[in-house]
Amino acid sequence: MWDGTLFFMKYGNNMCTYCVFLCGFVLLAFSIEITYTLSMNNEKNTKRKYSFFKDGAYNIRRTISLDPAAHSAMEVLLLYPHIKAIGLYRIAHWFWLRNHTFIARWFSNWARHWTGIEIHPGATIGKGLVIDHGMGVVIGETTIIGDDCQLYHGVTLGGTGAVHVKRHPTLEDGVYVGAGAKCLGNITLGRNSKVGANSVVLKDVPVNATAVGMPARIIIK
């Protein structure tokens, strides 16, 4: 006969701990969603509605559509490093905008050690960013990334100069940057443009154009 008392004595503590942890995680998640959504949508000059969970869900769906190696949403959520890196960036960015720079950088460093992806909390990133493989990607402080962009491992969106001004690239919507490419300085990669693997881009790339080489040359079809 099943003895409920013995079962509870053997597994009760672990089950209670798990339930408390799960409830705490759910409360934390909803707190992040409510706080992040309301505060980000109240920011001046905001151009779109923000939602921590909706942005994350969109990222997962877009990853599945782009990566044939992705088998399920759960796999992408738990095992793909860029999902965790971007989620932590969203939290870090929220603190950064409120001048809690130490906490913001702490989240950024945690994400870098956990995923190998370094995103400065001051960067501005739209929805749907996919960072395939992810290891070694660096995104600088004044970088601006539009919606539905795609980066591969080893990409650097770096700055030039030591003055605290706009010194990192701007990627418009739909930009693709291949593995190992370096995009340096206050340049603009136009909408739907592409950068070939290991290219070094030092000047603007027009809309729908491709940049390849070191230094990159522009190919317009």
Image (cartoon, rainbow, N blue to C red):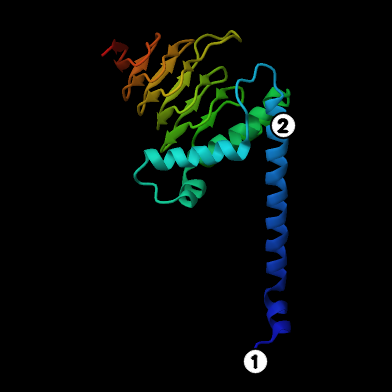
Residue 19 appears left or right of 178? right
Counting from the top left corner in percent of width and height, residue 6 is at 70, 83
Question: Which residue is tagged 2?
Answer: 38
Q: Considering depth in this image, is 105 or 84 the residue closer to the camera?
A: 84
Of 103 and 187, which appears nearest the observer? 187
Could you tell whether 219 is left or right of 44 in the image? left
Residue at horizontal 71%, vertical 46%? 28
Please name the residue that numbered disc 1 is placed on.
Answer: 1
In 3D space, how far apart are the residues under numbered discs 2 and 1 (Cα atoms)?
A: 54 Å
- Closer to the observer: label 2 or label 1? 2
Q: Position of residue 90 (x, y in %)?
A: 61, 32
Residue 4: tell me if it is visible.
yes
- On the image, which quarter does residue 153 sit in? top left
Circle 2 SS class: helix
Is residue 125 shown above or below 163? below
Amino acid type at image mark 2: Leu
Numbered disc 1: secondary structure: loop
